[in-house]
Image (spheres, helix red, strand yellow):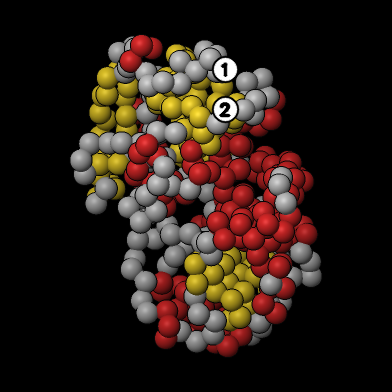
Protein backbone atom coordinates (compact mmCIF):
# COMPACT_ATOMS: atom_id res chain seq x y z
CA UNK A 1 0.00 0.00 0.00
CA UNK A 2 1.70 3.20 -1.20
CA UNK A 3 -1.18 5.65 -1.01
CA UNK A 4 -4.20 6.55 1.09
CA UNK A 5 -7.61 6.88 -0.54
CA UNK A 6 -9.61 9.83 0.76
CA UNK A 7 -13.30 10.65 0.26
CA UNK A 8 -13.67 14.43 -0.02
CA UNK A 9 -16.58 16.78 -0.69
CA UNK A 10 -16.75 20.22 -2.24
CA UNK A 11 -17.07 22.65 0.64
CA UNK A 12 -19.53 24.99 -1.10
CA UNK A 13 -21.51 22.19 -2.78
CA UNK A 14 -21.74 19.15 -0.52
CA UNK A 15 -23.42 17.02 -3.19
CA UNK A 16 -20.16 17.05 -5.18
CA UNK A 17 -17.75 14.41 -3.90
CA UNK A 18 -14.71 12.56 -5.20
CA UNK A 19 -11.88 10.20 -4.29
CA UNK A 20 -8.29 11.42 -4.06
CA UNK A 21 -5.07 9.45 -3.61
CA UNK A 22 -2.42 10.74 -1.20
CA UNK A 23 1.06 9.17 -0.92
CA UNK A 24 1.68 7.31 2.32
CA UNK A 25 4.91 7.98 4.25
CA UNK A 26 7.26 5.14 5.06
CA UNK A 27 8.10 4.61 8.71
CA UNK A 28 11.29 6.67 8.30
CA UNK A 29 9.28 9.52 6.76
CA UNK A 30 6.87 9.74 9.68
CA UNK A 31 7.28 12.76 11.96
CA UNK A 32 8.93 12.31 15.36
CA UNK A 33 6.58 10.21 17.55
CA UNK A 34 4.45 9.73 14.44
CA UNK A 35 2.00 6.89 13.83
CA UNK A 36 0.59 5.56 10.59
CA UNK A 37 -2.94 4.39 11.30
CA UNK A 38 -5.11 2.23 9.06
CA UNK A 39 -8.75 3.33 9.37
CA UNK A 40 -10.77 0.15 10.00
CA UNK A 41 -14.36 1.36 10.33
CA UNK A 42 -16.34 4.46 11.21
CA UNK A 43 -19.89 5.61 11.87
CA UNK A 44 -21.71 7.93 9.48
CA UNK A 45 -24.85 9.76 10.62
CA UNK A 46 -26.73 12.98 9.92
CA UNK A 47 -24.49 14.55 12.55
CA UNK A 48 -21.58 14.24 10.13
CA UNK A 49 -23.55 16.33 7.64
CA UNK A 50 -23.75 18.97 10.39
CA UNK A 51 -19.94 18.82 10.68
CA UNK A 52 -19.70 19.51 6.95
CA UNK A 53 -22.23 22.35 7.01
CA UNK A 54 -20.38 24.01 9.89
CA UNK A 55 -16.95 23.03 8.57
CA UNK A 56 -15.69 26.59 8.09
CA UNK A 57 -17.49 28.10 11.06
CA UNK A 58 -16.31 25.52 13.61
CA UNK A 59 -13.00 24.66 11.84
CA UNK A 60 -13.83 21.00 11.21
CA UNK A 61 -12.10 21.30 7.84
CA UNK A 62 -8.80 22.01 9.66
CA UNK A 63 -8.59 18.47 11.04
CA UNK A 64 -7.83 16.51 7.90
CA UNK A 65 -6.31 18.42 4.95
CA UNK A 66 -7.91 18.08 1.52
CA UNK A 67 -7.36 19.65 -1.93
CA UNK A 68 -8.32 23.33 -2.35
CA UNK A 69 -12.07 23.84 -2.28
CA UNK A 70 -12.68 20.38 -0.82
CA UNK A 71 -12.96 19.03 2.71
CA UNK A 72 -12.66 15.69 4.47
CA UNK A 73 -15.62 15.19 6.81
CA UNK A 74 -14.56 14.02 10.30
CA UNK A 75 -16.09 10.76 11.54
CA UNK A 76 -15.91 8.76 14.77
CA UNK A 77 -14.45 5.30 14.48
CA UNK A 78 -11.61 2.81 14.89
CA UNK A 79 -8.11 2.57 13.49
CA UNK A 80 -5.15 0.26 13.91
CA UNK A 81 -1.51 1.38 14.20
CA UNK A 82 0.47 -0.14 11.31
CA UNK A 83 3.71 1.86 11.77
CA UNK A 84 4.98 3.64 14.88
CA UNK A 85 7.86 5.94 15.74
CA UNK A 86 6.66 6.37 19.32
CA UNK A 87 8.50 4.12 21.82
CA UNK A 88 5.37 3.51 23.93
CA UNK A 89 2.88 2.79 21.14
CA UNK A 90 3.15 -0.55 19.40
CA UNK A 91 2.13 -1.66 15.94
CA UNK A 92 -1.23 -3.40 16.10
CA UNK A 93 -2.77 -1.12 18.75
CA UNK A 94 -6.47 -0.30 18.25
CA UNK A 95 -7.51 3.34 18.60
CA UNK A 96 -10.90 5.03 18.93
CA UNK A 97 -11.41 8.67 18.03
CA UNK A 98 -11.94 11.27 15.30
CA UNK A 99 -10.88 10.00 11.88
CA UNK A 100 -10.97 11.14 8.26
CA UNK A 101 -13.14 9.44 5.65
CA UNK A 102 -10.04 7.72 4.31
CA UNK A 103 -8.06 4.51 4.42
CA UNK A 104 -5.18 5.93 6.51
CA UNK A 105 -4.21 8.72 8.89
CA UNK A 106 -0.88 10.06 10.20
CA UNK A 107 -0.94 11.06 13.90
CA UNK A 108 1.76 12.92 15.87
CA UNK A 109 1.29 11.29 19.28
CA UNK A 110 1.73 13.47 22.37
CA UNK A 111 0.75 13.32 26.06
CA UNK A 112 0.80 9.53 25.80
CA UNK A 113 -0.85 7.73 28.71
CA UNK A 114 -1.98 4.16 29.24
CA UNK A 115 -5.55 5.08 28.25
CA UNK A 116 -4.86 7.37 25.31
CA UNK A 117 -3.03 10.32 23.78
CA UNK A 118 -3.60 13.36 21.57
CA UNK A 119 -2.60 14.31 18.04
CA UNK A 120 -0.18 17.26 18.25
CA UNK A 121 -0.13 17.98 14.50
CA UNK A 122 0.02 21.77 14.07
CA UNK A 123 -2.94 21.99 11.66
CA UNK A 124 -5.26 20.38 14.25
CA UNK A 125 -4.64 22.69 17.20
CA UNK A 126 -7.32 25.29 16.38
CA UNK A 127 -10.20 22.93 17.24
CA UNK A 128 -11.57 21.74 20.58
CA UNK A 129 -9.14 19.33 22.30
CA UNK A 130 -11.80 16.60 22.41
CA UNK A 131 -11.40 16.18 18.64
CA UNK A 132 -7.67 15.48 18.94
CA UNK A 133 -7.95 12.80 21.66
CA UNK A 134 -7.53 9.09 20.88
CA UNK A 135 -8.42 6.25 23.24
CA UNK A 136 -6.27 3.11 23.32
CA UNK A 137 -8.88 0.34 23.29
CA UNK A 138 -7.05 -2.85 22.30
CA UNK A 139 -8.88 -5.80 23.87
CA UNK A 140 -11.43 -3.59 25.64
CA UNK A 141 -14.79 -5.39 25.31
CA UNK A 142 -16.67 -2.07 25.59
CA UNK A 143 -15.15 -1.12 22.21
CA UNK A 144 -15.41 -4.46 20.40
CA UNK A 145 -18.11 -5.84 18.10
CA UNK A 146 -21.55 -4.32 18.41
CA UNK A 147 -20.52 -2.46 21.57
CA UNK A 148 -17.86 -0.75 19.50
CA UNK A 149 -20.42 0.18 16.86
CA UNK A 150 -22.52 1.85 19.57
CA UNK A 151 -19.47 3.78 20.75
CA UNK A 152 -18.96 5.23 17.27
CA UNK A 153 -22.62 5.68 16.36
CA UNK A 154 -24.05 6.91 19.64
CA UNK A 155 -21.45 7.97 22.20
CA UNK A 156 -20.50 11.42 20.77
CA UNK A 157 -24.19 12.25 20.20
CA UNK A 158 -25.27 10.88 23.59
CA UNK A 159 -22.67 13.08 25.29
CA UNK A 160 -24.45 16.07 23.72
CA UNK A 161 -27.81 14.63 24.87
CA UNK A 162 -26.36 14.20 28.37
CA UNK A 163 -25.14 17.81 28.51
CA UNK A 164 -28.45 19.26 27.28
CA UNK A 165 -30.35 17.12 29.81
CA UNK A 166 -28.04 18.31 32.58
CA UNK A 167 -28.41 21.96 31.49
CA UNK A 168 -32.21 21.79 31.43
CA UNK A 169 -32.41 20.06 34.81
CA UNK A 170 -29.94 22.54 36.30
CA UNK A 171 -32.27 25.34 35.16
CA UNK A 172 -35.33 23.50 36.51
CA UNK A 173 -36.53 23.32 32.90
CA UNK A 174 -37.15 27.10 33.00
CA UNK A 175 -40.52 26.27 34.57
CA UNK A 176 -41.67 24.11 31.63
CA UNK A 177 -43.96 21.13 32.19
CA UNK A 178 -43.05 19.59 28.82
CA UNK A 179 -39.92 19.43 26.67
CA UNK A 180 -40.46 19.43 22.89
CA UNK A 181 -37.77 17.88 20.67
CA UNK A 182 -37.72 18.38 16.91
CA UNK A 183 -36.19 15.70 14.65
CA UNK A 184 -37.36 13.20 17.25
CA UNK A 185 -35.99 10.29 15.23
CA UNK A 186 -32.42 11.62 15.38
CA UNK A 187 -29.95 9.94 17.69
CA UNK A 188 -29.22 13.09 19.69
CA UNK A 189 -32.94 13.70 20.16
CA UNK A 190 -33.86 10.23 21.32
CA UNK A 191 -30.80 10.14 23.58
CA UNK A 192 -32.10 13.28 25.27
CA UNK A 193 -35.65 11.90 25.27
CA UNK A 194 -34.46 8.69 26.97
CA UNK A 195 -32.66 10.66 29.69
CA UNK A 196 -35.68 12.90 30.30
CA UNK A 197 -38.17 10.04 30.21
CA UNK A 198 -36.08 7.81 32.48
CA UNK A 199 -34.73 10.30 35.01
CA UNK A 200 -36.72 13.57 34.88
CA UNK A 201 -40.34 12.70 35.48
CA UNK A 202 -42.92 14.26 35.77
CA UNK A 203 -41.60 16.43 32.90
CA UNK A 204 -43.29 15.17 29.72
CA UNK A 205 -41.32 14.53 26.54
CA UNK A 206 -42.93 15.41 23.21
CA UNK A 207 -41.29 14.37 19.95
CA UNK A 208 -41.88 16.17 16.67
CA UNK A 209 -41.31 14.13 13.54
CA UNK A 210 -42.35 13.55 9.94
CA UNK A 211 -45.36 11.35 9.29
CA UNK A 212 -43.15 8.64 7.82
CA UNK A 213 -41.11 8.37 11.02
CA UNK A 214 -44.00 8.11 13.51
CA UNK A 215 -43.84 4.32 13.85
CA UNK A 216 -40.09 4.33 14.54
CA UNK A 217 -40.25 7.24 17.01
CA UNK A 218 -43.18 5.64 18.85
CA UNK A 219 -41.37 2.29 19.00
CA UNK A 220 -38.47 3.90 20.87
CA UNK A 221 -40.68 4.13 23.95
CA UNK A 222 -39.02 7.27 25.31
CA UNK A 223 -41.55 9.90 24.15
CA UNK A 224 -44.74 10.55 26.09
CA UNK A 225 -46.29 11.96 22.91
CA UNK A 226 -45.35 11.96 19.23
CA UNK A 227 -46.66 14.82 17.07
CA UNK A 228 -46.24 15.21 13.32
CA UNK A 229 -45.08 18.56 12.00
CA UNK A 230 -48.45 19.34 10.41
CA UNK A 231 -50.21 19.02 13.79
CA UNK A 232 -48.13 21.55 15.74
CA UNK A 233 -50.93 24.11 15.98
CA UNK A 234 -53.20 21.54 17.67
CA UNK A 235 -50.85 21.09 20.65
CA UNK A 236 -52.38 22.23 23.98
CA UNK A 237 -51.25 25.50 25.53
CA UNK A 238 -48.71 24.84 28.29
CA UNK A 239 -45.26 26.06 29.42
CA UNK A 240 -42.79 24.33 27.09
CA UNK A 241 -39.05 24.15 26.59
CA UNK A 242 -38.12 23.60 22.94
CA UNK A 243 -34.90 21.83 21.98
CA UNK A 244 -34.37 22.40 18.27
CA UNK A 245 -32.43 19.53 16.71
CA UNK A 246 -33.45 20.42 13.14
CA UNK A 247 -32.56 24.07 12.71
CA UNK A 248 -35.62 24.60 10.51
CA UNK A 249 -36.56 28.30 10.80
CA UNK A 250 -40.15 27.79 9.60
CA UNK A 251 -40.76 25.14 12.25
CA UNK A 252 -39.22 27.31 14.95
CA UNK A 253 -41.40 30.27 13.92
CA UNK A 254 -44.58 28.16 13.98
CA UNK A 255 -43.83 26.83 17.46
CA UNK A 256 -43.03 30.27 18.88
CA UNK A 257 -46.17 31.77 17.43
CA UNK A 258 -48.31 28.90 18.70
CA UNK A 259 -46.99 28.91 22.28
CA UNK A 260 -46.16 32.61 22.56
CA UNK A 261 -45.02 33.54 26.06
CA UNK A 262 -45.51 29.91 27.12
CA UNK A 263 -42.34 29.11 25.14
CA UNK A 264 -40.05 29.49 28.16
CA UNK A 265 -36.87 28.13 26.54
CA UNK A 266 -35.84 27.76 22.91
CA UNK A 267 -32.45 26.16 22.37
CA UNK A 268 -30.80 25.27 19.07
CA UNK A 269 -28.65 22.16 19.11
CA UNK A 270 -28.46 20.76 15.58
CA UNK A 271 -28.40 22.06 12.03
CA UNK A 272 -29.51 19.47 9.50
CA UNK A 273 -31.56 21.88 7.36
CA UNK A 274 -29.70 24.30 5.12
CA UNK A 275 -32.20 27.18 5.31
CA UNK A 276 -30.95 30.52 6.57
CA UNK A 277 -32.52 31.56 9.88
CA UNK A 278 -34.78 34.64 9.93
CA UNK A 279 -34.47 37.30 12.60
CA UNK A 280 -35.26 35.29 15.74
CA UNK A 281 -35.52 38.48 17.82
CA UNK A 282 -39.01 39.10 16.46
CA UNK A 283 -40.43 35.78 17.69
CA UNK A 284 -42.73 35.70 20.75
CA UNK A 285 -41.57 33.79 23.83
CA UNK A 286 -38.01 33.04 24.88
CA UNK A 287 -35.36 34.22 22.43
CA UNK A 288 -33.82 31.26 20.54
CA UNK A 289 -30.25 30.68 21.66
CA UNK A 290 -27.54 28.19 20.71
CA UNK A 291 -26.74 25.52 23.27
CA UNK A 292 -22.93 25.49 23.46
CA UNK A 293 -21.76 22.20 24.97
CA UNK A 294 -18.25 23.38 26.00
CA UNK A 295 -19.82 25.96 28.34
CA UNK A 296 -21.71 23.23 30.21
CA UNK A 297 -18.60 21.03 30.26
CA UNK A 298 -16.51 23.82 31.80
CA UNK A 299 -19.21 24.56 34.39
CA UNK A 300 -19.57 20.95 35.50
CA UNK A 301 -15.83 20.23 35.39
CA UNK A 302 -15.37 23.04 37.90
CA UNK A 303 -18.30 21.93 40.09
CA UNK A 304 -17.87 18.15 39.87
CA UNK A 305 -14.08 17.98 39.82
CA UNK A 306 -11.75 15.72 37.81
CA UNK A 307 -13.57 12.74 36.30
CA UNK A 308 -16.97 13.95 37.51
CA UNK A 309 -18.49 14.28 34.07
CA UNK A 310 -17.13 10.93 32.88
CA UNK A 311 -18.37 9.20 36.02
CA UNK A 312 -21.92 10.55 35.66
CA UNK A 313 -21.96 9.93 31.92
CA UNK A 314 -20.79 6.34 32.41
CA UNK A 315 -23.58 5.76 34.91
CA UNK A 316 -26.24 6.37 32.23
CA UNK A 317 -24.38 5.23 29.09
CA UNK A 318 -24.71 1.49 29.69
CA UNK A 319 -28.45 1.81 30.43
CA UNK A 320 -28.97 3.87 27.30
CA UNK A 321 -27.19 1.46 24.95
CA UNK A 322 -28.93 -1.54 26.52
CA UNK A 323 -32.33 0.09 26.02
CA UNK A 324 -31.88 1.86 22.69
CA UNK A 325 -29.07 0.06 20.87
CA UNK A 326 -31.27 -2.93 19.88
CA UNK A 327 -33.79 -0.48 18.35
CA UNK A 328 -31.24 0.32 15.63
CA UNK A 329 -30.58 -1.67 12.49
CA UNK A 330 -26.78 -1.44 12.24
CA UNK A 331 -25.73 -1.77 8.59
CA UNK A 332 -22.09 -2.47 7.72
CA UNK A 333 -20.82 -1.45 4.28
CA UNK A 334 -17.35 -1.53 2.76
CA UNK A 335 -15.63 0.16 -0.17
CA UNK A 336 -15.55 3.67 -1.60
CA UNK A 337 -18.70 3.15 -3.69
CA UNK A 338 -20.67 2.22 -0.57
CA UNK A 339 -19.26 5.21 1.33
CA UNK A 340 -20.33 7.56 -1.46
CA UNK A 341 -23.81 6.03 -1.65
CA UNK A 342 -24.43 6.25 2.12
CA UNK A 343 -23.00 9.78 2.21
CA UNK A 344 -25.33 11.03 -0.53
CA UNK A 345 -28.33 9.18 0.94
CA UNK A 346 -27.66 10.83 4.29
CA UNK A 347 -27.15 14.26 2.71
CA UNK A 348 -30.45 13.97 0.85
CA UNK A 349 -32.36 12.62 3.86
CA UNK A 350 -32.96 9.20 2.32
CA UNK A 351 -31.68 7.08 5.24
CA UNK A 352 -34.40 5.41 7.29
CA UNK A 353 -34.27 6.54 10.93
CA UNK A 354 -33.84 3.00 12.25
CA UNK A 355 -30.75 2.46 10.11
CA UNK A 356 -27.30 3.15 11.55
CA UNK A 357 -24.34 2.92 9.20
CA UNK A 358 -20.85 1.62 9.93
CA UNK A 359 -18.55 2.14 6.98
CA UNK A 360 -15.05 1.32 5.77
CA UNK A 361 -13.23 2.79 2.80
CA UNK A 362 -11.37 -0.51 2.32
CA UNK A 363 -13.05 -3.21 0.21
In the image, taking residue 134 as reference, residue 162 lies left or right, namely right
For label 1, the residue is 88
Mark 1–mark 2 CB contact (< 8 Å)? yes
242 to 49, vertically: above or below: below
What whole-number distance in Å separates the C-alpha atoms at marks 1 and 2? Answer: 8 Å
The secondary structure type at the circle numbered 1 is: loop
Q: Count residues near mark 1 (Cα–Cα under 10 Å), then give few for <14, some for 14-19, many for 20+.
A: few
Image location of residue 189, percent across then percent down: 59, 57
Image location of residue 11, percent across then percent down: 27, 48
Q: Which label was assigned to residue 112?
A: 2
Total marks in image: 2
Q: Quadrant of the C terminus?
A: top left
Image location of residue 153, percent across then percent down: 56, 40
* Residue 57 image-quadrant placement: bottom left
Q: Quadrant of the N terminus?
A: top left
In the foreground, 260 or 225: 260
Q: Count residues near mark 2 (Cα–Cα under 10 Å), then give few for <14, some for 14-19, many for 20+.
A: some
Amino acid sequence: MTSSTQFVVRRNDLATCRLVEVPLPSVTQLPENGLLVKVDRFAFTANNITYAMLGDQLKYWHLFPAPDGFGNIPVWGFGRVIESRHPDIAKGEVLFGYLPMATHLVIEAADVKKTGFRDAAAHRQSVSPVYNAYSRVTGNPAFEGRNGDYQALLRPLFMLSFLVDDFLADKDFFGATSVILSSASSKTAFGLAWLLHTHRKPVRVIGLTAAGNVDFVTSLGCYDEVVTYDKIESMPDQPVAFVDMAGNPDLRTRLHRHFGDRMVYSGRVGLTHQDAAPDDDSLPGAKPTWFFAPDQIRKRAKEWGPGGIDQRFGAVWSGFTAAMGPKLDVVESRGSDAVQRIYLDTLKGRVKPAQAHMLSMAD
